[in-house]
């Protein structure tokens, strides 16, 4: 597969914009990754400046391989991140996280909707999946508001903090085909 292109111009709905990560975003990212809610639902995060820079390099290599597109959600401050990952053939997965002060404002819903439209229209994907922990109620709500349908509960599906975590799987088909 060829590289995933950067959306040009950056994706925006007039409230939030999705753009490539920049080195100046690292302090806001690190603050968000130390948040207890983020830590509860995630077991990954570069927690130092050097680790964040290496993470950006890893993401760029994955983008060039056509596997991942990871974008900052801004307004213009960094509100969180959203990604298209696991791209294979005509399928991909959506992921997202928010800084504490961005939660409860519809930011994740706006960002996911923008990225879903772009993934279907510009990349030509026909199916997207979104997974989250069974107890991550906010992520369930985002998925459903964006049109994803709950399809399965997979037991011991994903490595998580030294064990295995169950995952709720949501799916969305491109209905514009």
Image (cartoon, helix red, strand yellow):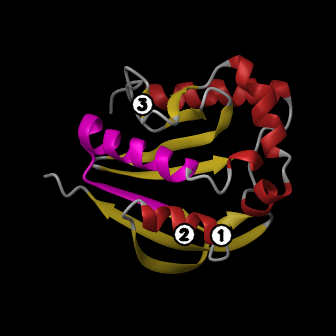
Asked if the residues shown at circle 1 and circle 2 are in contact, with their CB atoms under 8 angstroms apart, the answer is yes
Q: Residue at x 45, y 38 (%)?
A: 67
Q: Which residue is mark 3?
A: 11
Q: Going from the N terminus, do you reach mark 1 or mark 3 first?
A: 3
Q: Crowdedness of circle 1 by 10 Å Cα count: few (<14), some, many (20+)? A: some
- Is disc 2 surrounded by few (<14), some (14 to 19) or many (20+) residues within 10 Å? many
Q: How many marks?
A: 3
Q: Which of the 4 image quarters holds residue 66?
A: top left
User: Which of 70 and 36 lies nearest the eye of the viewer?
Assistant: 36
Q: Which stretch is magenta?
A: 107-130
At x 63%, y 72%, the residue is 137
Indicate whether 89 appears above or below 12. Answer: below
Q: Nearer the viewer, residue 47 or 164?
A: 47
Residue 140, given in percent of the width and then of the height, sits at 54, 69
Distance CA(mark 1)–CA(mark 3): 26 Å
Residue 140 — which label? 2
Q: Which secondary structure lies at badge 1?
A: loop
Residue that mark 1 sits on: 136
| Separation of marks 1 and 2 at Cα, in angstroms | 7 Å
């Amino acid at each position: 597969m060829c590289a995933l292109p950067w959306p040009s111009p950056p994706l925006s709905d007039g409230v939030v914009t999705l753009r490539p990560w920049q080195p100046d975003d690292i302090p806001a990212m690190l603050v968000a990754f130390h948040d207890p809610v983020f830590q509860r639902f995630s077991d990954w995060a570069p927690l130092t400046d050097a680790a964040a820079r290496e993470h950006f390099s890893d993401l760029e290599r994955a983008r060039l391989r056509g596997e991942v597109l990871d974008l900052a959600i801004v307004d213009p401050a960094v509100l969180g991140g959203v990604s298209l990952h696991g791209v294979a053939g005509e399928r991909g997965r959506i992921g997202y996280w928010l800084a504490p002060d961005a939660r409860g404002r519809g930011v994740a819903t706006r960002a996911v909707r923008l990225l879903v439209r772009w993934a279907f229209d510009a990349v030509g994907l026909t199916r997207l999946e979104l997974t989250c922990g069974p107890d991550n109620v906010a992520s369930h709500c985002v998925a459903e508001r964006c049109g994803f349908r709950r399809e399965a509960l997979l037991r011991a599906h994903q490595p998580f903090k030294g064990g295995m975590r169950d995952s709720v799987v949501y799916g969305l088909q491109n209905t514009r085909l």
